[in-house]
Amino acid sequence: MRIACLHTVDSNAAVFDAALRTAGLAEVSLRHTVRPDLLAAAEREGRLTPEIAAQTVAILQSLSAEADAVLLTCSTLGPAAEAASRDAPVAILRVDAALAAEAVREGGRVVVLCAVETTVEPTRRLFEAAARATGAEVSVQVVPHAWDAFRAGDRDRYWALTADAARAAKAQGAARVALAQASMAGAAALLPEAVRPLGSPAVGLAAAVAASRARQDAALRLQAGRA
């Protein structure tokens, strides 16, 4: 099974490779495409503009031609995956959609941590939509100074700030803490299991695999029905 990943941060390729190894999905191969210019443009504009979204949709649809599933790993660009998935030949997913579904599954108070301001609104819309089915209370928060540390290349400080924010959220009564951006996943290793936040790489890959298998099964049933 081939999963194409569209990233806006180069280091996320290694994050997803590691998540794939941990999951033990030997039958899955990942193809990484990195487009930091898309996130940079959204940051300049302060939001995901229709033009940036259209460019992202075109890239996702192009990747779908040679993959069994496509995964968009940038939360800021997430809505573009929903647009690209319409009538697509394979599943095109935003990685944080599976994260949102898992985070709100048991209800309660859910804190979602972001590092980039442009991620806040698309993340809030996604998680609040998922929460309607379970009654979860969603709070989306930016981790102060985290993105500055990331952009300066100080990943250790980036993850430490994220881990501190996750720990604080749990101490303040959050039932679940979710890390909106895939690049934040390294923070989980700094925390004990009891307060460890949910990250998107593992749940996103699992969702892509499940979606691809579901489509393959549906195609086989259709063929069998025609036989």
Image: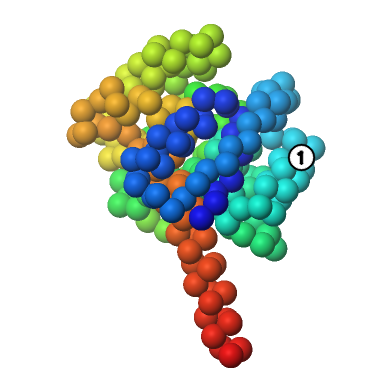
Q: Can you say whether 10 is above or below 83 in the image?
A: above
Q: Does the rendering let one see residue 78? A: yes
Please give the name of the residue rendered at 53% of the width and 68% of the height, measured from the top-left corner: 216
Give the quadrant of residue 138. top left
Q: Label 1 crowding class (10 Å Cα cut-off): few <14, some 14-19, many 20+?
A: few
Q: How many labels sit on residues?
A: 1
Furthest-front residue in view?
26
Give the quadrant of residue 47. top right
Q: Does the rendering let one see residue 161? A: no
Please give the name of the residue rendered at 69% of the width and 54% of the height, measured from the top-left corner: 65
Please give the name of the residue rendered at 72% of the width and 43% of the height, measured from the top-left corner: 59
For disc 1, the marked residue is 55
Q: How is the image coloured?
A: rainbow
In the picture, measured across the screen, residue 201 lies left or right of residue 60, that is: left
Front one among 170 and 223: 223
In the picture, measured across the screen, residue 135 lies left or right of residue 68, that is: left
User: Where is residue 27 drawn, in percent x and y?
Assistant: 43, 53
In the picture, measured across the screen, residue 211 lies left or right of residue 55, that is: left
Q: Can you say whether 93 is above or below 227 in the image?
A: above
* Quarter placement of the C terminus: bottom right
Please give the name of the residue rendered at 39% of the width and 19% of the height, measured from the top-left corner: 159
User: Where is residue 133 drawn, in percent x and y?
Assistant: 42, 58
Q: Can you say whether 181 is above or below 132 in the image?
A: above
**Label 1: which secondary element:** helix
Furthest-right residue in view?
51
User: Where is residue 136 drawn, in percent x and y?
Assistant: 37, 48
Task: Give the amino acid at mark 1.
Answer: Gln
Q: Can you say whether 182 is above or below 202 in the image?
A: above
User: Where is residue 68 drawn, in percent x and y?
Assistant: 58, 56
